[in-house]
Amino acid sequence: MVLVTTGVQDRGRWQSVAEPASGREPRTRLEEAGDSMAAQCEVCGKKPASGNNVSHANNRTKRRFLPNLQRVRAVIDGRTKHVRVCTRCIRSGKVTKVA
């Protein structure tokens, strides 16, 4: 990725600002690695929930409850496709798995 720096005047000072040469937003580290897929079920849309870890001394720290996603081959619109779906959608029959 090539970045072009341009000068921007802010409060009487010139600052160097990095802009992508292609004219689009710079990519994050996850997008460059190809792992930009969110932890979200493609059928029901279930996402991570937030809550607290509670210790015996009642100390609370933030944590995330992630959905149990599985990558399965399923029939979608008459075609076979790999999808990431939660186990509840698989169990309830919302997804038709390919044998």
Image (cartoon, grey):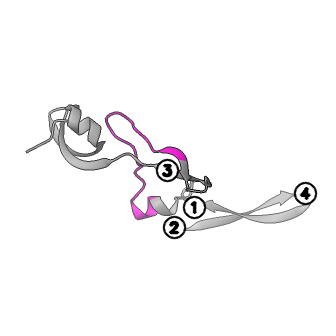
Is residue 39 highlighted in magenta?
A: yes
Q: Which of 51 and 48 is in front in this view?
A: 51
In front: label 1 or label 2: 2
Question: Reading the chain from its start, which is encountered first: label 3 or label 2?
Answer: 2
Mark 1 packing: few (<14 Cα in 10 Å), some, or many (20+)? few
Please identify the dominant SS of the magenta region.
loop
- Residue 24 in view, yes or no: no
**Residue type beneath disc 3:** Arg
Read off the residue under disc 2.
Answer: 1
Which residue in the protein does label 1 denote? 21
Q: Name the residue under label 3.
A: 64
Looking at the picture, which amino acid does disc 4 mark?
Arg
Badge 3 vs badge 2, beta-carbon distance below 8 Å: no
Q: Which element is circle 2 on?
A: loop
Residue at 33% x, 39% y is: 42
- Contact? badges 1 and 2 (CB < 8 Å): yes
Disc 4 and disc 3: Cα gap in Å? 42 Å
What residue is shown with label 4? 11
Q: Could you tell which of marks 4 and 3 lies nearer the N-terminus?
A: 4
Residue depicted at 42% across the width and 48% down the height: 66
What is the secondary structure assignment of the residue under circle 3? strand
Q: What stretch is highlighted in magenta?
A: 31-51
Q: Where is residue 43 in the image (x, y as percent from the top left)?
A: 31, 35
